[in-house]
Image: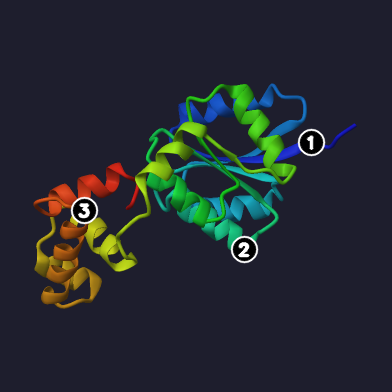
Amino acid sequence: MSRTIKVLLAEDQSMVREALAALLGLEPDIEVVAQVARGDEVLAAAREHAVDVALLDIEMPGATGIEAAAQVNRELPAVKLVVLTTFGRPGYLRSAMEAGADAFLVKDAPAAQLAEAVRKVLAGERVIDPTLAAAALAGGANPLTDREREVLRAAADGATNAELATALHLSQGTVRNYLSTAIQKLAVRNRTEAVRTARDKGWL
């Protein structure tokens, strides 16, 4: 008899998390041994419960699923990582793979497909939603540098250049330069459009 696969579920919406746990719990060889609602709780839970596979939503408080994946990959490399998203943004796929994800699926995939992905990653396979894979290839690489992404993320709440400079420990001129370069690279008119475009493509 094959051993039970121990799964950690990280999802901030309790209804979605419980539904996923219930569906996976119907599988004879899968047991959800831990559930968390925050990205910054993933590593501790994965370590405490000695999980085989972590299912990570992208949008979570504390840390994104991609940030959590990178942390687990660094600290617990034996744990397989499945990133789930509501958003079919090709940039997220690229970021997830760079963070060490073994699978990338949309949340509305059938439960059987999710269970099969858990088994496949444990067997050393990589599982990627084919539609997202095609979109990622068509979308090209993220043109933004880490600093440009950092400034755009900080600008998303409408902060002034002075406020951004203080928050990021940069001069106002440097902030202005990063924003200007990002706007040019994304071929948009202003920072608001730059933030929206970068988010839509999953580049933030």
Please, what secondary structure does the residue beneath circle 1 have?
loop
> Which residue is label 3 attached to?
186
Residue 103, image x, y percentages: 58, 42
> Which residue is label 1 attached to?
4
Q: Residue at the location (41% across, 33% down)?
A: 86
- Label 3 to label 2: alpha-carbon separation: 35 Å
Please, what secondary structure does the residue beneath circle 2 have?
helix
User: Disc 1 or 3, which lies upstream in sequence?
Assistant: 1
- Number of residue marks: 3
Amino acid at dot 2? Glu
> Which residue is label 2 attached to?
75
Closer to us: 148 or 22: 148
Amino acid at dot 1? Thr
Residue 163 appears in the rendering = yes
**Residues at circles 1 and 3 in contact by the CB criterion of under 8 Å:** no
Q: Residue at the location (16% across, 57% down)?
A: 183
Vertical side of 152 occupied by 24: above or below: above
Amino acid at dot 3? Leu
